Image (cartoon, rainbow, N blue to C red):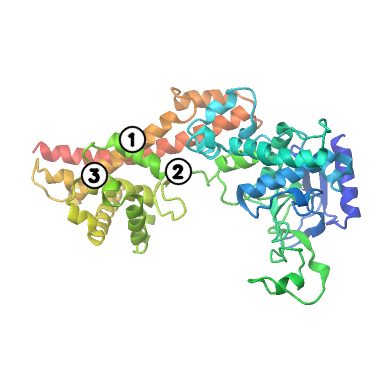
Amino acid sequence: MTGSNAVANLLSWCSERGFWIDERLRVTTGPCGVAVVSKEVTIPSDSILVRIPRESVLSVKSCSISDLIPPHPYGRGAQLSLALALSAELAIGSASQFFPYLQSLPPDVPGMPLFWRGGAGPMEWLNGTEAWKMMFGPTEDASLLAEIDQYFHQIALSVFTKVFGSQCGSVPSLQDFHRAYALVSSRSFLVDAYHGLSMVPIADAFNHTQENHVHLESDFDVCPECGSLDRCAHDDMAVDSVPRSTINDHSDDVFEMVSNRAIPPNSEVFNTYGETLSNAELLVQYGFILDGNDNDQLTWTWDELAQFSENHLAASARTWDSIGGRAYFEDLLRSIISRPWESISNSELMHLDHNHPFSLNGDATVSHGLWLYFASLLILKNAPSDHIRNKSSLILLLEEIFQLQLTLEQDIAADEDLSLSLPPHPPGDERWRDSPSGVILELAKLLISLCRSRSGRTGRPGLQMTELGDILDSLPNDLTPTRMAISLALTERSLLDSCRSGWEGLASGLDGQGKSRESL
């Protein structure tokens, strides 16, 4: 079926089911199946543009095999359950009540790297990136694709056997399930307490940008058993029921697409899939990236930092395990967060991040948790045991080190003599190494090594940034898998190099001061 016919059938189906679409919008074919554009007028903010009946969303509850699908309210389980429901509806074709909507969906698997075909290909460019970590985790045995395939073989196939019996030609294949999962990952919405994660016709036609025009509004607090917006028999049986109206007014029994800013005429109308999504998250979940994304960041796990520390600190250094391990550090982090650390905003090298404790953000600055991990570890390396176990003393020392670092950053920015801010130790004094300034120097060197190590593992090993850029420039400008993968690797390496450069400036200043004193 041609794209124009699919859109016509979709709109006819929507009309029959009570959808309402503002006449100032036009639903048309787009690169991802269907798109929405404005007509020759400006649409003001706070305008209701689409009303979608709740009963018209495709969910586990509304699909034709709802009684056979194990329920999962959220997370990966919800995605897999909805993929199973969608697979069944696609398989029964014209017998599905959602058939015109299903025909409007992209015929191919969206460009998510999870399903890129053809051997290594573009996947090799994702080595070491955040996208790679999201897909494969610590081992390929625990990969997202392995989890999807396991669900298909252990659960979906048994359901398909019950539905389709011996009709082998009708039973969805693993590739069919991959397509369904990709569609769910890239197009579904969490709509209410009854339907949960759902495919929402017309709402999923609005493509993504961070500066979006519209958003989906819904009353989430419906009865999770029957979907009622009003009081129902299930309320009396529920322990923690949410109060709902006793008036049977079904005027709000819809989901609405509402404009959150003015929409210019003759332009595509965009939704957002998440205002804080990085390019790695967009690529893995939706199969595309943005040209410049302020949300890009790199993360490390506790185990990754522990392995790095073992490789870059002396073997005799105390480990976290000797004083309580990860639990000790997390308690330390909570203790520090409770203190006034607002001055971190004045640093050019670090930032405050409570959600991603070990990370590097789009400004190429390290999180306070990453800084504290290495600063604390360097103190633990040489400090007496009783001093280590006294958290208050350790926190005060960490604050002293940070305040000195902040002063040194300001001195470097103003091109001032760092020696005026450093403790006056005699030349050659061993206290230089164990002083706050010595800790900062070693900390800077560790973060430089951390960035260099990760950069070397990102993308295709052995290639310089300029070589990556030349390869990218030779590729077509459309969002091909190889172009997206190289762009992501290039962005992450650029952030790592920028972060490394900042700490190299601090280390160079400190190292120079230390050497100048030794020569006196």
Nearer to the camera, 1 or 324: 324
> Is 119 situated left or right of 204 in this image?
left
Residue 34 - label: none
Q: Can residue 279 be seen in this view?
A: yes
For the residue marked with disc 1, what is the amino acid? Ser
Few, some or many residues within 10 Å of mark 1 (<14, 14–19, 20+):
some
- x%, y% of residue 433? 17, 43
**Which numbered disc flags the more N-terminal residue, 1 or 2?**
2
Alpha carbons under labels 1 and 2: distance apart? 15 Å
**Which numbered disc flags the more N-terminal residue, 3 or 2?**
2
Q: Is residue 501 visible?
A: no
Q: In which quarter of the image is the C terminus?
A: top left
- x%, y% of residue 143? 55, 36
**Mark 2 falls on what kind of element?**
strand
Question: Disc 1 marks which residue?
Answer: 449
Few, some or many residues within 10 Å of mark 2 (<14, 14–19, 20+):
some
Alpha carbons under labels 3 and 2: distance apart? 24 Å
Few, some or many residues within 10 Å of mark 3 (<14, 14–19, 20+):
some
Nearer to the camera, 150 or 229: 150
Question: Disc 3 marks which residue?
Answer: 318
What residue is at 43 percent from the left and 42 percent from the top? Answer: 300
Residue 299 - label: 2
Q: In which quarter of the image is the N terminus?
A: top right
- Foreground tag (1 vs 2): 2
- x%, y% of residue 268? 74, 46
**Which numbered disc flags the more N-terminal residue, 3 or 1?**
3
> Is 253 situated left or right of 342 in this image?
right
Give the image quarter of residue 451.
Answer: top left
For the residue marked with disc 2, what is the amino acid? Thr
User: Are the residues tagged 3 and 2 within 8 Å (C-beta)?
Assistant: no
- Foreground tag (3 vs 2): 3
